[in-house]
Amino acid sequence: MSAIAFSDLNLTLGKKTILKQTSASIKAGEFTILLGPNGTGKSSLLKLISREWQTKGQVSYFGRNLDEWNPAHLAMHVGVLPQHSNLTFAFTAREVVELGGLNLHSCQKGITKIASQNMQRTDVTHLADRLFPSLSGGEKQRVHLARVLTQISQSEDKCALLLDEPTSALDLGHQHRTLQLAKEMANQGSAVVAVIHDLNLAAQYGDRLIVLNEGQIAADGTPEEVLTPALIESVYNWKVNVMTHPSGHYPIVIS
């Protein structure tokens, strides 16, 4: 059974078709990365899957149609890290992370403990008493990741994590720590889907890469199957060389 399945998703904004008849299924225990040029529908696809935006296509989680889920119950099993946050209230970082525990079956002391553990996982413990609006973009991104991890901390064997450009504001070390954490979640049985622009990060951490182009899936497979010079040139309109990492044995894209 697929952890996430979607079929015939379509999206038109104004006169531009963003996605057309897009279908795929995501397995539990799989780290799937969405790639593709700017404006090709990667973030839009996540919004359709999470029902932030509406579509006539079908979306299901763990064998149940999305419309059959109680929203509060679904929130315990599906976590979404958006690309941007509009939170401007003067909450501390700790309070923001603890907001993820609103649906948990736990007392405040238990929520605080879970939130603290996830702040440690995302390296924001030292920011706990800082006001959220005062944080840098990368710090906010990591605080929100801790919040999402807190939200799904009681998901048990049904867990899906949707990440929209989780490394966009992060420095080198935190990029890798964040993707290591996502990979760890997948290895523990979660279905993890992330939008990433960096082809080399995708090659290093992704189990499966789905490339979107002109509203459709242009390629779907392992990093070795997908990241070929011909495919990259056809999608990104740029010539590259592809080598194999000497120790990691995953593809390296060289412009």
Image (cartoon, rainbow, N blue to C red):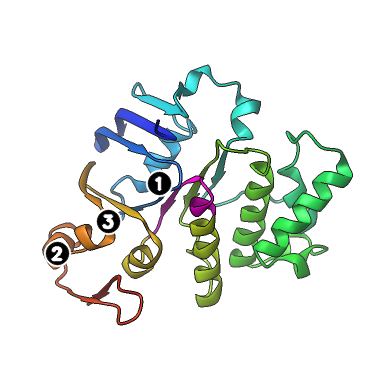
Front-most of residues 236 and 122: 122
Q: Is residue 153 left or right of residue 30?
A: right
- Residue 16 % position (x, y): 25, 38
Range shown magenta: 185-196
Q: Is residue 194 magenta?
A: yes
The residue carrying mark 3 is: 222
User: Does the segment drawn in magenta span residue 216?
Assistant: no
- Contact between marks 3 and 2 (CB within 8 A): the answer is no
Q: Label 1: which residue?
A: 43
The residue that appears at 45% across and 31% down in the rendered structure is 53
Q: Relative to 58, is 190 on the left or the right?
A: right
Instruction: Look at label 2 and name its amino acid.
Output: Glu
Q: Which residue matches tag 2?
A: 233
Instruction: Please state the horizontal and vertical placement of residue 32, each as a whole percent of the image.
Output: 38, 50
SS for callout 1: helix
* Residue 91 showing in the rendered view: no
Callout 3: helix, strand or loop?
loop
How far is disc 3 from disc 2 in space, using C-alphas? 18 Å
Q: Earlier in the sequence, mark 3 or mark 1?
A: 1
